Amino acid sequence: MGTSKTRDYKEKRMKVLYIGHYKDGTGWGDAAKNNILALHSAGVEVVPRAISYSDSDSEPDQTIQELEKGSTKDCDICIQHTLPVNYVYDSNFKNIGYLATESSNFVDSQWSKNINMMDEIWVPSEYVKSSCIKSGVTVPIKIAPHCLDLSDYHLQNGSAQIEQLKGSFNFVFIGEFSERKNLKALLRAFHSEFHPKENVNLYIKSSGIEVQKLQDYCNSIKKGLKLRSNYKNDILVCGRIRKQDYNAILSQCHCFVMPSRGEGFCIPVLEALALGIPSLHTSGIAIEEFAVGDTVKSKREPCFGGMESLPNLYTARSHWREIDIEDLQIKMRSAYLNGLPNELKEACKSQAEKYSHENIGKLFKEILNDE
């Protein structure tokens, strides 16, 4: 994210209708919620209206509930934070689509046709911008990164801790259980590199799978290594947990590892930064645009196996990055040996500050004032 330049324009009056899935209770929904709160923090009059892609909605926070009471009358801008197939053009507004995607292109979908109906498109990273251009998007594309309420990332007394994580060096992975996230590569690297007697753990927080099924999956990967009869147990948590517990457990960790084949941004990495935790991550994806830590070598490969996504995404006509497992082992070993120096923790927190509601809200407002 570049630094904001001084502008000599006169700010325009604006009232924003924000249509999004902020009640879904998912990471994607949290991104929409934080965008709304960032706009509000910058003094933009924003009126949220929810749609849903999930079976059950969660209750939004008090600020958004208050903003929902606003009238859509006189809104002159409409931000549609939905799937592009749901974009609708309305000549009463400036129409902005918000899009994140995780592969090199989406040429097998009809997304570009829908996106090109809009007046402009917002994306969270250069990685997504490149994907849009390669897919035939011709409308203006603006970089509008994800953000966080950094006040959430302070430990509260009595918050949850995991006993096994105390007194050891802990790697952490947070993400849904999907082919794109490439948890298999992380399991292979960790259990190939570290002996069970070493004082190191792997904590996995996942969704979209039950704990027993995830345990069986982890065991099958370890069995496939054929290195020993017994391996260190992975520490597994599945499903949603309270925010304060989520942050307290994450704060017990020392290095975030994301071996993903493709990311349009990756909010859990940003959350780790807010708690002073650096990351190891696949080269060539959006994480390296904002993360503190180290990139791991990767190579470009056609997408394969992303069956949990929409049928016309992640096809073999688009590409992902395949992480180099041996280089991941080397980088994990180095992180373990070096620990987490205070200066690195502070660098992480300083970087996270750039993605606060206040800073990103100012950027959003600046983009909205651009002609």
Image: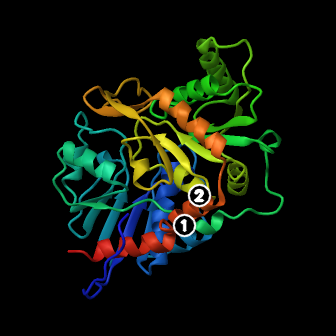
Closer to the observer: label 2 or label 1? 2
Secondary element type, mark 2: helix
Q: Nearer the viewer, residue 232 or 109?
A: 232
Q: Which mark is residue 248?
A: none
Determine whether 23 is above or below 369 in the image. above
Q: Are marks 2 and 1 in contact (CB under 8 Å)?
A: no
Is any atom of residue 166 visible in this view? yes
**Residue 358: percent from left, percent from top:** 49, 74
**Residue 43: percent from left, percent from top:** 44, 81
- Label 1: how many residues lie within 10 Å, few (<14), some (14-19) or many (20+)? some
Judging from the image, the colouring scheme is rainbow
Determine whether 119 is above or below 206 in the image. below
**Residue 159: percent from left, percent from top:** 79, 56
Determine whether 168 is above or below 343 in the image. above
Q: Residue 344 carries which label?
A: 2
Q: Quadrant of the C terminus?
A: bottom left
Callout 1 amino acid: Ser
Badge 1 is on which residue?
Answer: 350
The residue drawn where x is 17% and y is 45% is 136
Secondary element type, mark 1: helix
Give the quarter of the image for residue 276: bottom right
Q: Quadrant of the N terminus?
A: bottom left
Q: In this view, does 241 lie to the left or right of 15?
A: right
Q: Distance between the residues labelled 2 and 1?
A: 10 Å
The residue drawn where x is 44% and y is 33% is 180
| Mark before the other along the chain sequence, 2 or 1 | 2
Q: Nearer the viewer, residue 337 or 115?
A: 337
Q: Is residue 260 left or right of residue 101?
A: right
Callout 2 amino acid: Leu
The residue drawn where x is 54% and y is 33% is 330
